[in-house]
Image (cartoon, rainbow, N blue to C red):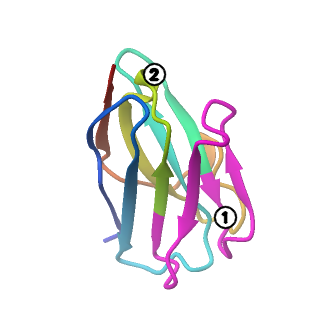
Amino acid sequence: QVQLVESGGGLVQAGGSLRLSCAASGRTFSRNAMGWFRQAPGKERDFVAAISWSGSSTYYADSVKGRFTISRGDAKNTVYLQMNSLKPEDTAVYYCAATNSPSSATTISLIDYWGKGTQVTVSL
């Protein structure tokens, strides 16, 4: 059974940092793209960041570009999201995502696996 388990969420003041982790199990994702999405209360789930299977290509939503960094662990079954200069508008549940595609995890329609999410709350 494939599982994506997120960790690292929490409450942080504006301007602070958090690092989210996602550990995949049940199959190897070493040849698959992975990414992060987020959903704020009352809003749709939105793309945040994605990384190709090799880690050589990364993609970011305009709203987080320059502040967030996505990376993969050496075993490729772990993906991280380093979030710096956090803003109250970054408050959301953050979801780890994986796709059967090697290169693209940037849109919801391409996602094959989802984690259950981790809450990130940024206070003023």
Where is the C terminus found, in terms of image quarters?
top left
Q: Which quadrant of the structure image shows residue 39?
A: top left
Disc 2 versus disc 1: distance between alpha carbons?
30 Å
Classify mark 1: residues with Cα within 10 Å, few (<14), some (14-19) or many (20+): some
Q: Give the residue drawn at x 32%, y 45%.
A: 117
Instruction: Tell me the residue at 58%/54% (across/down).
Output: 69
- How far from the left and from the top, in percent, is residue 27? 42, 79
38 versus 74 height, above or below:
above
The amino acid pointed to by label 2 is Glu
What secondary structure do most residues of the magenta stretch adopt? Answer: loop
Q: Is residue 36 left or right of residue 50?
A: left
Q: Secondary structure at mark 1?
A: loop
In the rendered image, the vertical position of residue 88 relative to residue 49, given as above or below = above
Instruction: Give x and y (percent) for residue 46.
Output: 54, 32
Label 2 residue SS: helix
Residue 70 spot, x, y in % from top left = 57, 57
Residue located beneath label 1 in the image = 101
- Tell me where the magenta segment starts and ends, as one range: 50-79
Q: Residue at x 49, y 85 (%)?
A: 75
Foreground pick, 4 / 92: 92
Work out which residue is located at the far top of the displayed protein and give it: 42
Labels 2 & 1 near each other (Cβ < 8 A):
no
Q: Give the camera-side residue of 122 and 59.
A: 122
The residue sitting at the bottom extreme is 75
Nearer the observer: mark 2 or 1; the answer is 2
At label 1, the amino acid type is Ser
Identify residue for label 2.
89
Q: Verify whether residue 57 appears in magenta.
A: yes
Q: Is residue 92 magenta?
A: no
